Structures are given as structure tokens and as C-alpha cells.
Image (spheres, grey):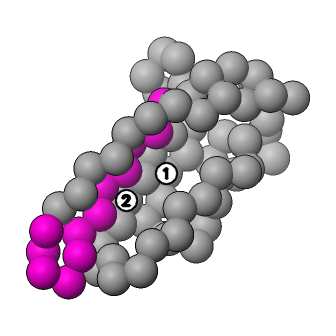
Amino acid sequence: MFQVVAEGVQHFEIQVYNRRGQVVWESDNLIESWNGEYFNDGTECPSGIFVYKATARDFNRKKYNFNGRVTLIR
């Protein structure tokens, strides 16, 4: 499970990509989390490394960019 929680965030977006660069999950909800399935629809993603990219804006409109890797182990 992958979840991001932050205070003072006015806008948030996150995408998770597979090794082919395809989006396997995305959200603009800080509380929603990725459960290792394609768009949380019940179809499991294979084990491997996934890349995430997230952007957030605070109440002062300052933009923050986050990216990294998540290893999914089954």
C-alpha cells in the first residue's frame, strides 16, 4: 500500500507508472492509497519497481514536486 498524507496542501496529484511508462494508478485525493492493483480495480500488478510522480500546492500556491520508486513484492 502506498499512501501520502500532508497538512496544508490545497491541491495534490499523484501518478504511479509501470516499467513501460504506463499509468497504473492516479489520484488527486490525499487519503486514497494505491493497493498494488491497476487503478485499484482488482487486477493485480506484477511484482517489480514502479515509479511515482506527485505534485502538491500549498495555501501560498508554492508548488512541490516529488518522485521516486516503489517496489511491489507479492
Q: Which residue is the extreme one toward the left?
A: 61
Q: Position of residue 47 (x, y in %)?
A: 76, 22
Q: Which residue is the extreme one toward the right?
A: 74
Q: Tell me: 45 left or right of 42.
A: left
Name the secondary structure under disc 1. strand
Q: Tell me: 31 left or right of 67.
A: right
Bounds of the magenta segment? 51-62
Cα distance in 3D space between marks 1 and 2: 7 Å
**Identity of the residue drawn at 78% across and 38% down:** 43
Mark 1 burial class by Cα count in 10 Å: few <14, some 14-19, many 20+ = many
In the picture shown, does residue 16 fall above or below 18? Answer: below
Q: Which residue is mark 2?
A: 13
Q: Any magenta on residue 64?
A: no
Q: Is residue 23 visible?
A: no
Name the secondary structure under disc 2. strand
Q: Which residue is the extreme one toward the front?
A: 7
Image disc number at residue 36: none
**Identity of the residue drawn at 52% across and 69% down:** 5
Q: Which residue is mark 1?
A: 26
What type is the residue that disc 1 sits on? Glu
Q: Position of residue 13 (x, y in %)?
A: 37, 59
Q: Position of residue 17 (x, y in %)?
A: 49, 32
Assess whether mark 2 and mark 1 are in contact (beta carbons under 8 angstroms). yes
**Identity of the residue drawn at 72% across and 51% down:** 1
**In the picture, which quadrant includes the C terminus?**
top right
Looking at marks 1 and 2 on the same chain, the residue that comes earlier in the sequence is marked by 2
